[in-house]
């Protein structure tokens, strides 16, 4: 017996009085890890998804191929039921390569900037736009400048806060400029926006991501530029007026039929209690979506693979969901919540993986305020079984695609890996399989499978 397991058993009397957790659970979780680290297929699945299929923007042929591929995988895993849930998704196309360049600098002359159109952005028209640039650091600053922005290009240059240890918190503080910047600037007569890419790293890689046109705002073109180019543009603006030319041909087409891919293993004694594992199948078009969110999809698939491979017979229904259109619409998640509520289902727990395939750190948890504290107390009693694998629980969010299940009053979890490198790759052309470590990916799948095992064994009701 390993020293680690002996330590766990020694701590049981002190740390696990409330639930009938036994030495058998520690051994079974060890078995989950051993099997996942020796016979997992998630890395091979990720290679196919990213290299053979590629970027999977909702409405694209690649998204349709990913639906069929993951449906076939679930069939091959011999899940009890596999089905496609229809959902109408937005169909946005990027168009021709974007052009952004400084055109009148006394110091720099004409200088190209590395840029990507933001998702859902309208185009500039074939001739592009040339206008003076005004730099801002917040949405509120746009409102304070008001009508002086008429006919200008607004440059949103709020960096992600490097002092935030949780990079998702830093992202959340800065993402508003990308999501709502175009709408806010449009209300004051701006003709376009440039947005600093959302990453803590200074580099030459632009990041895309969704922009949302709010009611009452005329859509204007919205493009991101790299952090290095953002720094350069900001320095120039302190020295002289700067005009920028920007051109993109992005456009929105009619909504298109797509699908969530769903498979489940029926529970033996409490089939009405559902434990969901999932990720979003779509990605941005400029990369292959390896961390965002190919990793999350294959994490979820590996959980049901290990359940079948180990011969484990769950008491509760284990459901695996590949959600469509998280990136620029959340249509798949919304369709799933509405359908589930109509069926009067009860998701006892849902676990979403959408933070990359890095080394596991644990899980964040969320839930309806009426039940959250009591159920979360039950979950943290399992910590002695999970801490040897570097896992912890903390209160926080879960995942966009499962957030609408909160009303069913189960617990919602977000798989939480180490986040420090995630935004180096997020929404970029370099989010490919070469930046995903095979062992880290497998450890994430084992962590999720272990939590599913405990939830299934003991419930939280």
Image (cartoon, rainbow, N blue to C red):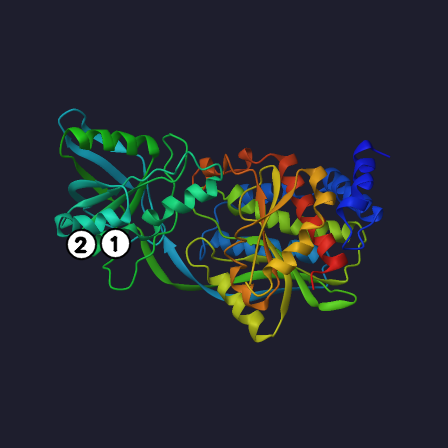
Viewer-side residue, 260 vs 239: 239
* Quadrant of image for the N terminus: top right
Q: Is residue 117 left or right of residue 76?
A: left
Q: Position of residue 364 (x, y in %)?
A: 57, 49
Mark 2 neighbour class, 10 Å CA radius: few under 14, some 14 to 19, many 20 or more: some
Q: Is residue 116 left or right of residue 322?
A: left
> Residue 334, relative to residue 172: is it above or below?
below
Query: Badge 1 is on which residue?
Result: 184
Viewer-side residue, 402 vs 308: 402
Label 2 element class:
loop
Label 1 element class:
helix
Mark 1 neighbour class, 10 Å CA radius: few under 14, some 14 to 19, many 20 or more: many
Report the disc number at residue 420. Answer: none
Question: Most extreme residue toward the front, as rendered?
Answer: 14
Q: Is residue 133 left or right of residue 349?
A: left
Q: Position of residue 299 (x, y in %)?
A: 63, 47
For image coordinates 16% across by 28% down, the residue present is 239
Q: Position of residue 408 (x, y in %)?
A: 58, 68
Viewer-side residue, 245 vs 156: 156
Question: Most extreme residue toward the right, as rendered?
Answer: 1
For image coordinates 19% across by 41% down, the residue present is 134
Q: Position of residue 151 (x, y in %)?
A: 14, 49
C-alpha separation, residue under disc 1 versus residue under disc 2: 7 Å
- CB-based contact (under 8 Å), mark 1 and mark 2: yes
Q: Is residue 312 left or right of residue 347?
A: right
Q: Is residue 396 visible?
A: yes
* Quadrant of image for the C terminus: bottom right
For image coordinates 24% across by 44% down, the residue present is 247
Query: Badge 2 is on which residue?
Result: 188
Q: Is residue 427 visible?
A: no
> Residue 340, relative to residue 149: is it above or below?
below
């Amino acid at each position: 017996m390993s020293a680690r397991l002996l330590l766990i058993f020694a701590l049981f009397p002190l740390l696990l009085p409330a639930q009938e957790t036994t030495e058998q659970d520690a051994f079974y979780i060890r078995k989950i890890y051993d099997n996942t680290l020796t016979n997992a297929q998630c890395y091979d699945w990720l290679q196919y998804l990213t290299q053979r299929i590629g970027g999977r923007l909702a409405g694209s042929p690649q998204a349709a191929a990913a639906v069929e591929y993951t449906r076939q995988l679930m069939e091959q895993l011999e899940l009890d039921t596999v089905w496609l849930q229809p959902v109408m998704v937005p169909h946005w196309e990027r168009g021709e390569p974007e052009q952004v360049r400084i055109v009148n600098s006394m110091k720099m002359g004409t200088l190209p900037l590395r840029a990507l159109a933001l998702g859902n952005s309208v185009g500039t028209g074939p001739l592009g736009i040339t206008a003076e640039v005004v730099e801002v650091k917040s949405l509120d600053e746009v409102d304070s400048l008001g009508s002086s922005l008429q006919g200008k290009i607004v440059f949103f240059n709020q960096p992600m806060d490097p002092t935030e240890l949780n990079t998702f918190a830093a992202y959340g503080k800065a993402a508003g400029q990308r999501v709502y910047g175009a709408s806010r600037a449009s209300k004051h007569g701006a003709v376009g926006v440039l947005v600093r890419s959302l990453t803590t790293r200074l580099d030459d890689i632009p990041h895309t991501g969704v922009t949302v046109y709010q009611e009452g705002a005329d859509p204007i073109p919205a493009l991101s530029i790299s952090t290095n180019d953002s720094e350069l543009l900001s320095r120039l603006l302190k020295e002289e007026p700067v005009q920028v030319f920007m051109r993109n041909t992005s456009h929105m087409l009619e909504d298109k039929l797509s699908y969530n891919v769903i498979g489940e293993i029926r529970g033996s004694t409490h089939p009405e209690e559902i434990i969901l594992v999932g990720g979003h199948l779509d990605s941005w078009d400029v990369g292959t979506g390896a961390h965002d969110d190919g990793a999350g999809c294959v994490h979820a698939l590996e959980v049901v693979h290990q359940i079948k491979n180990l011969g484990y017979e769950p008491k509760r229904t284990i459901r695996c969901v590949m959600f469509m259109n998280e990136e620029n619409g959340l249509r798949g998640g919304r369709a799933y919540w509405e359908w589930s509520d109509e069926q009067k289902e009860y998701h006892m727990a849902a676990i979403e993986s959408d933070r990359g395939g890095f080394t596991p750190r644990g899980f964040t948890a969320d839930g309806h305020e009426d039940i959250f504290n009591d159920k979360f107390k039950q979950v943290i009693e399992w910590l002695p079984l999970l801490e040897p694998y570097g896992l912890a629980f903390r209160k926080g969010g879960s995942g966009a695609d499962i957030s609408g299940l909160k009303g069913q009053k189960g617990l919602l979890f977000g798989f939480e890996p180490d986040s420090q490198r995630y935004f180096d790759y997020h929404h970029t052309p370099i989010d490919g399989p070469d930046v995903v470590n095979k062992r880290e990916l497998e450890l994430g799948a084992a962590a999720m499978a272990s939590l599913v095992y405990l939830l299934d064994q003991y419930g939280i009701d």
